[in-house]
Every structure is written in structure tokens, then in C-alpha cells.
Amino acid sequence: MSTRRFSGTLVMIGVAVLALLIAAPTLAETFTFQQGVNGYERAQDTTIRWAYATNFGDSATIESDNRGDPGAYEMWSTSGGRTSVLEVGQFFQSTVAGFTTGVFTTEAGPAYRYSRMYIRFRDVFGTGANQIPPEAEISSATLKLYNTEDQGAVVAVGAGVFPDIVPGIDGISLANPKAEPKLNGGTIAIYPSLVPISYGFDDGLSSKGKVTAKERRRSKQGWSQGPCLTQLADNDPIAMAFNCGPADVDDPEIAFWADMNDAVPGEPEINSRHPGVIEVFQDATGGFKEFDVLGLIDFITGDSVYITALSPEGALPTMDINYGNAYRSSEFGNVYDDDGNLMAGGSTEDIATRPILVIELGGSTAPGDANGDGVVDVADLGIMGANFGSTNAVVADGDFNDDGIVDVADLGILGANWTASQATGNTSVLVPEPATLSLLAMSVLVGRGRPVYG
């Protein structure tokens, strides 16, 4: 290489370094939606909840022929979107259960409860302020749910709790060991909801068209009247966990009952076979749990997604171990009267733990990201330097403008998108100091081989 050519290379490097320093670095645009934050008030979440008393009607001297008691009035309802904690999973309720109305025995227990959750974020897309343009390219979507303590032995009506002492046979008082609130872990599944659901907030006794424990009835759903009451095996709380609930795609036994009053019976309500479904284990620690919902974005911003928990095969919850999580709701911290009027809003700390949907725009590979790790840093500079001057190049070689050549133009693109700080979750952009950047560029590009003077 002649001295003139080598000097020319240094000039090119200098131009590129200048481009790195003066270019305005760009990040993928990020939108965050959380109830009560930045004016956003369009999130809704709700739950299906039912109890199941095994061996209903049994005593020390009587073994009845029964299927257990599924607590149908709860199965027909969803929680109002103004409930503070939404459970997802299989939970232990109490040691005793019903012998007859108002009378309990140890032999009739234990009782379990099963909870599922729906959530949606409305008005995410649009042309208004803080909305995402409908044609925007989405590179990632993350749902964050804050795991908190479950509701313990809270019963359906009026948010009361099963007492420590209950009436037994012949008027004898009976101790009732019951579950206390705790943190739980389990495999959480998120499926698309295929039908709209109702969101309410009343707190009253169960009756047709009314609600129970801040839970609105979803009419009398077929799945609760059919298989969950009449078709499941006798006293089978495991079948309750896996087979009871909204009708799934291609599940004829339950789907037949899902819309048995409609013209076309068997319309599915959820789809556990959708390619975007999520099934991931979440441990029993408190705090935000994250779910990649990119494949479900049309549902979580539409009718909603359905969230359930999958117990280990053959496992039942115990006094000490439940299977699932319990999440702060979009109304966490708010206080309402019986008519649904807001009496007191949640604190700043309360609001901070409500569900969050984070959507990032842009392609999956940032300009300047040669190795596809999601950040543009010195590793990408090294790749580009190793291939500087190459022809028939691709992005993985450092050709970021798609002209087939790795050259100073690509170095400028790399500098304009330098995002090393993203690797640590910092939302700011770190651009190397001028001297550091000059040394990096020169060491990578010039240091590829010893120049020959002549």
C-alpha cells in the first residue's frame, strides 16, 4: 500500500469517526401501557373462579355417591375489572367441606378453588396521542404481571373468609384449618380468547343476571352446566383443573357444551393450539413476571387473552403448596362503593405494580447490529472491521446499507445506532468518547494488517 493510499484510508476513517460523533443515535421506539400512567385508562382484566368440594355429603358414618360440589354459581361468573388481585391457578381452600347446607365434616373435604384470568389493553393502536400507528412494525411485545400473595380462603360472596370454627354434625363445633395468603409458583399458560367477555364490578349474592364477589356472570356458560357438573369423573379435582373451563379449539367434549343454546353448538372460546401461545414456569417470588406476547398481540389488544395455570401431572394443591400465581390487577389500590363509583384512587406505589404492556417498534435487527444480539456495540464494530472492503457482503458481515460492500457508509450507520447501554437495560444511549471511538475504529480497520510503505 502506498503512503498516499494509507493516508487516504486514514481520511476515510476520520470521516467515519466524525459521522459516529455527530450522528444522532436512534433507539427503537417503545410504548408502555399501564392503567393510570400517562393518561392511559383503557386496560381491563377479570377472572373466572370456582370452588370444588370433594366428597360432598360424606361423614364419618356416611359415604355418599357424589361427584363433589363445583360451586356452580362461581363457575358462571367472571370477576369485575375492579378486583385488586386476580388469581391464576389451583389453590387449596379449606380442610372441611359441606355435609349438608350449613353443616360441615372433615370427611367431606378438602375444598379447592380454581381461578383463571383474562386481560386486555384497549385503544393501543390508533392515530391519537400515545397510540401506536396501525401500520407500525412491532419488534417485541411484553406483558408484565406483578405476582403477589393469593387470596387465601376468601369465599365468593362479599369477600368474606371461611371461619376458623364451623358447625358440624349434631351442633358440634368443628375446627376448620384453611389456607392463608401466600406467594405461589407454577406453569402459566396464555391463550388467545376467541369470544368477547363481560367485565363488571358488583359485589352481591348470586342470582341470574347478577354478580358474585365482584364477579359478573357470563350467562350460564355451557361448560359449567355440562361437563363440569355432570360429565367429569366422580370426585376428581384433577379433572376439574384440566377439563373445566372455557371451551378449547378441537375439544369436542367441552366444546359441545360451550354454546349449547346457540344455533351452532360447540363454538370454541379459547385456542391453546395457536402458534403464539405461552407456557412458561414462573417461580414463587413476588414482583413482575414477564411474558413474550408478540404472537398474541392482536388478542391482548383485542378481545383479550386467557391466562391459566398447568399443575404437574397428578398433583393437587395442599395447605402449603399451590400451583399458579396471583397478580395485581389494573385496578390495584382503587376503592369503589357498591355502585362502582371510585371512592379513592390507588397510590403511586399501587399503580406501579399494575399490569404493564410494553411494545417496541422497529425491525427485529437494529441497523448496525451485525451479530443479531439486539445491541450495536464494539462486537459489531469488530465484525465490520474484519470485513471492511469486502464485496458481496451481507448484514452479518457489516453491510448495513445493503449495497453489498462493507465501507465507511456502514461505519456511519453503526455509529448512528450505537446502543451498547441497552444490554444492561438502560434506556439511555452510550456513545463512546471521541478518543475511544477513534482508537476503536483505527485499531479495528487499520490493525487488520501491517501497512507496507513504498
Image (cartoon, rainbow, N blue to C red):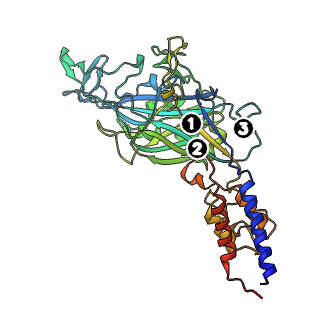
Q: Amino acid at mark 3?
A: Ile
Q: Which residue corresponds to the image point at 53% horizontal and 39% vertical from the top-left? A: 144
Is label 3 in a helix, a strand or a loop?
A: loop
Is 170 situated above or below 294? above
Query: Real-space Cα distance between discs 3 and 1?
Result: 15 Å
Crowdedness of circle 2 by 10 Å Cα count: few (<14), some, many (20+)?
Answer: some
Q: Nearer the viewer, residue 333 or 220?
A: 333
* Residue 315 point in image, percent of width and height: 35, 45
Q: Is residue 391 visible?
A: no
* The quarter of the displayed image where residue 379 is located: bottom right
* Residue 426 point in image, percent of width and height: 57, 47
* Residue 234 point in image, percent of width and height: 36, 36
* Residue 87 point in image, percent of width and height: 44, 32
Work out which residue is located at the far bottom of the displayed protein and give it: 454
Crowdedness of circle 3 by 10 Å Cα count: few (<14), some, many (20+)?
Answer: many
Q: Amino acid at mark 1?
A: Ile
- Answer with mark 3 or mark 1, whichever residue precedes in sequence: 3
Query: Real-space Cα distance between discs 3 and 2?
Result: 15 Å
Q: Nearer the viewer, residue 143 or 151?
A: 143
Q: Is residue 331 visible?
A: yes
Taking 366 as reference, is 227 left or right?
A: left
- Answer with mark 3 or mark 2, whichever residue precedes in sequence: 3
Is label 1 in a helix, a strand or a loop?
A: strand
Q: Which quadrant: the C terminus? A: bottom right
What mark, if any, has residue 356 been given in the picture? 1
Residue annotated with mark 3: 132
